[in-house]
Amino acid sequence: MKSITIAELHEQPDTPLIDVREPDEYAAGHVPGAVNLPMSTLGEHLDQLPAEPFHVICQVGGRSGRVVEALSGRGYDATNVDGGTAEWVASGFPLER
């Protein structure tokens, strides 16, 4: 499974970012530019995934890792964000609300 660090994510603001946390988690604060497609309903929204390579983030990296594994098996070019939103905050980067 492909993965990147928070520092690498911060250096790639133009790569699409999918946040697979639940809507209430997303609303509480997310990485700027992230699009919310919750893991629990992602199967119903595959048509909303980017055609180009994209990153997947959750709170700490567990859910996004599972999503990346599943999507990679379907031919998507998805990369997991290690440490997730919690690591983004711990690194001092701002959240969008």
Image: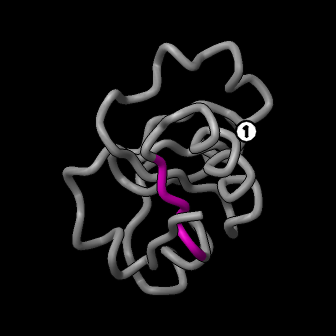
Instruction: Please identify the quarter of the rendering in which residue 82 is found.
Output: bottom right
The amino acid beneath tag 1 is: Glu
Q: Residues within 10 Å of mark 1 (few under 14, many from 20)?
A: some
Instruction: Assign the magenta stretch its main secondary structure.
Output: strand
Estimate the x, y position of residue 12 in percent, counting from the top left: 23, 64
- Residue at x-position 68% and y-position 45%: 67
Residue furthest toward the right?
Answer: 40
- Image colouring: one colour
Q: Nearer the viewer, residue 27 or 69?
A: 69
Instruction: Please identify the quarter of the rendering in which residue 93 is found.
Output: bottom left
- Residue at x-position 73% and y-position 36%: 39
Provide the secondary structure element on which disc 1 rests: loop
Left or right: 62, with 8 as reference point: right
Left or right: 79, with 45 as reference point: left
Which image quarter holds the N terminus? bottom right
Residue 79 is covered by the magenta coloring: yes
Q: Nearer the viewer, residue 51 or 17?
A: 51
Residue 11 is covered by the magenta coloring: no
Estimate the x, y position of residue 80 in percent, counting from the top left: 55, 61
Q: Is residue 14 above or below residue 3?
A: above
Q: Is residue 64 above or below residue 6?
A: above
User: In the rendered structure, which segment of residues is drawn in magenta?
Assistant: 78-82
Estimate the x, y position of residue 55 in percent, counting from the top left: 44, 52
Q: Nearer the viewer, residue 94 or 8?
A: 8
Estimate the x, y position of residue 72 in percent, counting from the top left: 57, 44
Residue named by callout 1? 22
